[in-house]
Image (tube, grey):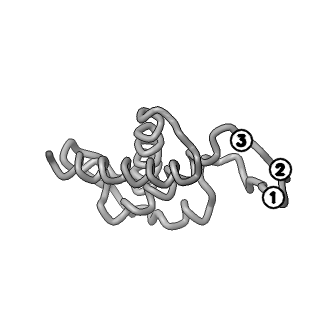
């Protein structure tokens, strides 16, 4: 198995485990879709061109995981601006897929990237 597949597989397993603890169960495709979406957002912001062997820069693996987890835990509450239930309050700052504190950790590259 190439390094790309190993990293994606490890991220998938970690994401699925974390969601199971939260009683969030989805088809495997959903977990992979959320990982892929996070990878695309990070690459776009970094101006990084993915290759077959290197779909993203390894230093962003943990951030990609956290972005995917954030996104998957919002399933069913998309676009929510305020919610209170059993003493738990939820509000989403903006309409972006990911919060600014996660996005600010992606440092854009300067210049043309090949």
* Front residue (pair 49, 114): 49
Instruction: Tell me if mark 3 has few (under 14), some (14-19) or many (20+) residues whose alpha carbon lies within 10 angstroms of its own.
Output: few
Instruction: Tell me if mark 2 has few (under 14), some (14-19) or many (20+) residues whose alpha carbon lies within 10 angstroms of its own.
Output: few
From the viewer's perspective, tell me whether residue 35 is left or right of residue 23: left
Disc number at residue 89? 1
Q: Secondary structure at mark 3?
A: loop
From the viewer's perspective, tell me whether residue 57 is left or right of residue 32: left
Q: CA distance from mark 1 to mark 3?
A: 13 Å
Q: Which residue is mark 2?
A: 83
Can you name the residue that lies furthest to the left here?
1
What residue is at 41 percent from the left and 42 percent from the top? 36
What residue is at 15 percent from the left and 47 percent from the top? 2
Q: Which residue is mark 3?
A: 77
What residue is at 30 percent from the left and 47 percent from the top? 9
Q: Mark 1 or mark 2: which comes first in sequence?
A: 2
From the viewer's perspective, tell me whether residue 73 is left or right of residue 39: right
């Amino acid at each position: 198995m190439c390094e790309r597949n190993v990293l994606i597989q490890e991220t998938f397993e970690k994401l699925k485990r974390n969601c199971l603890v939260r009683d969030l169960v989805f088809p495997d495709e959903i977990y992979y879709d959320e990982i892929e979406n996070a990878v695309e957002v990070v690459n776009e912001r970094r101006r990084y061109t993915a290759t077959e062997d290197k779909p993203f820069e390894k230093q962003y693996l943990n951030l990609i995981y956290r972005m995917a987890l954030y996104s998957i835990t919002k399933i069913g509450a998309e676009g929510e601006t305020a919610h209170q239930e059993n003493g738990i309050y939820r509000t989403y700052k903006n309409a972006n897929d990911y919060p600014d504190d996660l996005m600010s950790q992606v440092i854009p590259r300067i210049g043309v990237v090949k």
